[in-house]
Image (cartoon, helix red, strand yellow):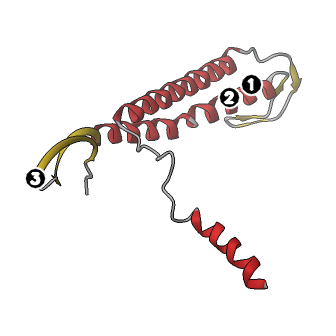
Amino acid sequence: MRIIFCLPILLALNTGAISQQQNPVQPPVSEDYLKKSKKQKKAAWILVGSGAVLIATAAIIPRGDLEYDGIDIGPYSSDKYQNDGIKSGFLIAGGITALGSIPFFIVSHKNRKRATTVSLKMEKAVYIYKQNYAATRFPAVRMKMNF
């Protein structure tokens, strides 16, 4: 009795394993890599520009009023001004933003290299058709690998 219930379930689970894929995934071609590279480079330049603007803003903000007259020991002075926290916040945020663009530049360069190594090419195939040889052409993805 158990076999009657378990056998159809096992057969139903197994049919999906041997069927063909309905929508095969196409490998990315060079145009896709070029678009991706351009978007990443644009994002990197935006990050560099916004970091530079934040750093320039930190330089432009005035010091403000003197809050604490500190002690001068040699070249070191511990004076505290009203806008010191705002200036340092803008400076740190600008530095982090500008440094955050470096991975985007690196990945953009890698995708640009991939775009030059992956391309489409027309291939020939010879096959037997009704006891004769027949030739056909089909598009194929050509990938150049540098080791």
Q: CA distance from mark 3 to mark 2?
A: 76 Å
Badge 2 amino acid: Leu
Q: Residue 57: x percent and y percent?
A: 67, 17
**Mark on residue 87?**
1
Residue beneath disc 2: 91
Lateral position of residue 42 relative to residue 3, left or right:
left
Q: CA distance from mark 3 to mark 1?
A: 81 Å
Check contact, mark 2 vs mark 1: CB within 8 A.
yes
Quadrant into which the C terminus falls? bottom left
Q: CA distance from mark 2 to mark 1?
A: 6 Å
Q: Residue 5: x percent and y percent?
A: 76, 77
- Which picture quadrant has residue 38? top left
Mark 1, residues whose alpha carbon is within 10 Å: few (<14), some, or many (≥20)?
many
Mark 2, residues whose alpha carbon is within 10 Å: few (<14), some, or many (≥20)?
many
Lateral position of residue 124 relative to residue 50, left or right:
left
Check contact, mark 3 vs mark 2: CB within 8 A.
no
Badge 1 amino acid: Lys
Question: In terms of secondary structure, where does tag 3 sit?
Answer: strand
Quadrant into which the N terminus falls? bottom right
